[in-house]
Image (tube, rainbow, N blue to C red):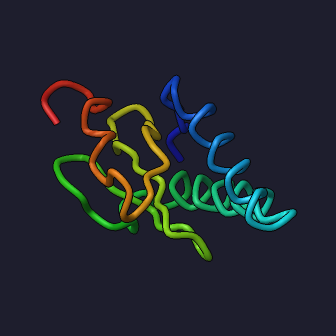
């Protein structure tokens, strides 16, 4: 298994999303965090089973949420670059890609 590396902006992005879901219903933010943790585990275990996006970029959809974990399947690691909502600015993360992707 390759290690997982996280983009520097990811933590703030995830915390903002968790706060948003908690504002809708208490505890829903924790559900999001658990879903992200499961997706991260799935990415580490079997990255090529995740949906292809482009180049080395793939995504792992989250259960119960309209979002996906976007990552680059790099030679030395799986670089998680974004938690992307399916409908709100779905391609904003393109600027975070490694040059050449």
Using the image as rendered, state which of residue 32 and residue 81 is in the foreground. Answer: 32
- In this rendering, the answer to whether 55 lies above or below 24 is above
Which residue corresponds to the image point at 32% horizontal and 54% vertical from the top-left?
90
Residue 79 vs residue 44, the one in the foreground: 79
Return the x and y of residue 85 as percentages of the image width and height: 44, 58
* In this view, 42 is above or below 3: below
Q: Farthest residue in the front direction?
A: 23
Q: Residue furthest right?
A: 26
Specify whether 33 is left or right of 98. Answer: right
Residue 29 placement (x, y as % from top left): 76, 57
- Residue drawn at the location 33% of the way across and 55% of the way down: 58
Q: Nearer the viewer, residue 43 or 21?
A: 21
Q: Residue furthest bottom?
A: 64
Instruction: Name the residue nearer the viewer: 50 or 29.
Output: 29
Res 53 quadrant in image: bottom left
Q: Quadrant of residue 41?
A: bottom right
The residue positioned 18% from the left and 53% from the top of the image is 54
15 vs 68: above or below? above
Is residue 76 in sight in this rendering? yes
**Where is residue 56 drawn, in percent x and y?**
24, 46
Rendering coords of residue 7 (x, y %): 48, 29
Residue 51 vertical position relative to residue 18 in the rendered view, above or below: below
Q: Residue at x 74, y 65 (%)?
A: 24
Q: Could you tell me which quadrant the C terminus lies in? A: top left
User: Is any atom of residue 78 visible in this view?
Assistant: no
Q: Is residue 68 left or right of residue 53?
A: right
């Amino acid at each position: 298994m390759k290690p997982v590396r996280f983009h520097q902006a990811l933590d703030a992005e995830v915390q903002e999303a968790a706060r948003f879901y908690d504002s809708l219903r208490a505890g829903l933010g924790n559900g999001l965090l658990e879903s992200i943790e499961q997706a991260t585990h799935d990415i580490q275990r079997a990255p090529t089973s995740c949906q292809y996006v482009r180049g080395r970029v793939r995504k792992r959809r989250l259960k119960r949420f309209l979002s996906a974990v976007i990552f680059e399947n790099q030679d030395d690691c799986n670089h998680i670059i974004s938690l992307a909502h399916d409908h709100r600015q779905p391609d904003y993360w393109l600027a975070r890609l490694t040059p050449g992707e």
